[in-house]
Image (cartoon, rainbow, N blue to C red):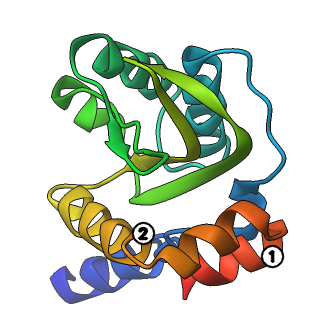
Amino acid sequence: MLFKKKKEATETQQPKKALLYRENVKVGCKPESKEQAIRQVGQMLADSGYVGQSYVDAMVEREKSFSTYMGNGLALPHGVEAAKKEVKASGIAVLICKEGVGWGDGNEAQVIIGIAGVGDDHLEILSNIAEKMLDDTATEQLLSGDADLVYRILAG
């Protein structure tokens, strides 16, 4: 009986989600504010089932206490530590705003990648994004490409 229950449990487990889905890449975005951009990537994460709805507010809270602007036009908004329980699966959502969004201190974010990470996954996600963004050619392609190209660069 014990073995049968274990088998049933594994059969009902959800398949692992991809880190990025094509529908979570938006180009040509023109959010009116940093908060609107954060809420937009957060809502994409929630709509895709990566996070619970309250994680979106936690992303806005994080930004109030610590800027997620990384430099070179890149911002990586994510939730506060207390919101980790709202993360259901690791994932990202991407906004490409060629004209830039004011991110404070005179910074303009053009590539905004919302992050949700289960456990310590967010560290690996941040590392992978940083590595890709070190390549100036990739950054230029993100800003000038369509959503399919952005998806291929970030998912590849």
Q: Callout 2 environment at 10 Å: few (<14), some (14 to 19), or many (20+)?
A: some
Q: Is residue 57 left or right of residue 112?
A: left
Q: Where is residue 64? Give x, y as percent.
A: 31, 10
Residue name at image x 43 percent, y 79 percent: 135
Residue name at image x 32 percent, y 74 percent: 128
Vertical arrangement, residue 102 with respect to residue 123, above or below: above
**Residue corresponding to mark 1:** 148
Indicate the amino acid at tag 1: Asp
Q: Quadrant of residue 59?
A: top left
Residue name at image x 22 percent, y 83 percent: 1
Vertical arrangement, residue 150 with respect to residue 87, above or below: below
Q: Nearer the viewer, residue 112 or 135?
A: 135
Q: Is residue 25 left or right of residue 10?
A: right
Q: Secondary structure at mark 2?
A: helix
Label annotation for residue 133: 2
Q: Quadrant of residue 29?
A: top right
Q: Where is residue 122? Give x, y as percent.
A: 25, 57
Q: Where is residue 150? Give x, y as percent.
A: 69, 71
Q: Is residue 65 left or right of residue 141?
A: left
Q: Secondary structure at mark 1?
A: helix
* Tag in front: 1 or 2: 2
Vertical arrangement, residue 6 with respect to residue 27, above or below: below
Quadrant holding the C terminus: bottom right
Q: Where is residue 12? Give x, y as percent.
A: 47, 72
